[in-house]
Amino acid sequence: MDLKTLGFKEIEHERFDKTNTPYKIYADLLDDTTQDQFEAVLSKPYVTYGALMPDAHAGYSMPIGGVCATKGVIVPQFVGFDIGCGMCAYQTAFTKEEVKAKAESIHQKISSTIPLGFKKHKNHQSLKLDLPLTAFTKTVLNAVGLMQLGTLGGGNHFIELGYDSSDRVWIVIHSGSRGFGHKIASHYMYQAYLEKNPKLNNIDKHLEEFAQRNQKLKIDNPKTYVKAFEKFRHKKQLELNKKVNLDSLEGIWGLDVESALGRDYITDQNFALFFARENRKKMIEVIVDILNESIDIRDKKVFDDESRFINKNHNHAEFDETRAEWIHRKGATHAEEDMMGVIPANMRDGSFIVRGKGCKTSLNSSSHGAGRVMSRSKAKKEITLEAFKTSMHGKVGTIDKNTIDESPFAYKDIFEVMSLQKELVEVVEHIEVLINVKDNTSRY
């Protein structure tokens, strides 16, 4: 695939050098928008270092496949909308031949049992609240999150069953914190913007009106009043967030990590990371049950063995004790020395189980996948269904006109991407695809 014909260009190092922020780029070609975004990131006074992984491409505010370190500031835009989006890989007790023999049936059962796309459960799912969360996020969790727990989502999210070099079957899942995380991210992105533009914050007017209407309640029953006030405030925040088009708000807006808002974002981001991990685990449990029913009762779903269960998210910010800075990863996998990770390719080429090498110039990071070379709309126009089906020969998957934008041709060559990051990760296993499940609801 010739990336230059798809709009990718030589890297303009001079423009990045002018920011006076040290950086490292592992990609060999980048499109204009990605270069513009990376320059904007490096130009922020609190950004001390930046890196682009070999799968880097344009995202929202910061390139996907981007990593940066910041001093005293956390930036919701640098984490993105799908907080905690990431990969889980679980080695089952089943073999390639056993799953392959019933692949069509297993694909159908997974597709009909696990809610895909915008679908969710009808009832709240159980979730042990092991981490703190703010009152705002608890409201969102009860309103949205608990019905989305154990659901896949759409776009490039997938469930895959494949086999390793010993023919053991793995369950590989790419999913995140769903609409729950999106609402949290949108809220803090907007609040960070309002901090820089306080005159635009009109929620105070609604709160004053609420206080006027409920003066008697405040006097007679102050505890009830406080609860009602907080519930109203959260409801209004969600309503206002819905009306905001974040794409129209120019700039990058960070939060002081010592501010109340900054601390709240860190708390809720960490909870969303936990939610995303539990979301993927719930789906693995369902899939293991399907395999046990379809083949033989053999697997007990043990999640505490890293050789069998690996979880790595690729949208987060975390504090680095050594640097005393915040490392933001947006579409980049954490890859400390000897840390296990999962890097997916596309619907055809499977996923890689990797071991990190702790490369400092990448901020201990690697790619999170292959990286797109075509927008979804372009892929729909230029890739034929016939070519898509031919490329997926021998695989059982969600292969139709509504998933053309996820075909292998829409992504960079994963083998070239892996070659560009040999100093970042070591490949432990290549998981070959047997079954790929995606949402196939039309996105247009």
Image (cartoon, helix red, strand yellow):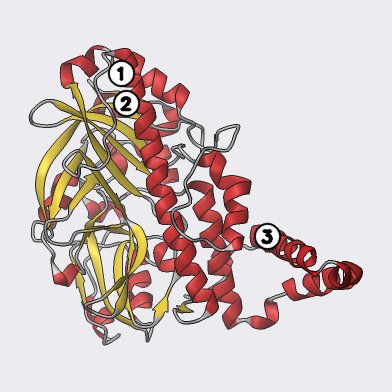
Q: Which residue is drawn at 34% across and 33% down?
A: 284
Q: Residue 292 carries which label?
A: 1
Q: Which quadrant: the C terminus?
A: top right
Give the percent coordinates (x, y) of residue 107: 35, 21
Q: Residue 243 carries which label?
A: 3
Q: Which residue is drawn at 44% across and 49% down?
A: 275
In this rendering, would 125 be left or right of 279?
right
In this rendering, would 249 be left or right of 55?
right
Q: Which of marks 3 and 2 is in front?
A: 2
Q: What residue type is labelled 1?
A: Asn
First of labels 1, 3 by sequence position? 3
Secondary structure beneath dot 3 equals helix
The image quadrant that residue 245 belongs to is bottom right
In this rendering, would 235 be left or right of 115?
right
Marks 1 and 3, how far apart at CA: 46 Å
Q: Are discs 2 and 1 less than 8 Å apart at CB? A: yes
Secondary structure beneath dot 2 equals helix
Label 3 neighbourhood size at 10 Å, few (<14), some (14-19), many (20+)? few
Of the pair 65 and 201, the residue shown nearer to us: 201
Observer able to see residue 66: yes
**Residue pointed to by mark 2:** 288
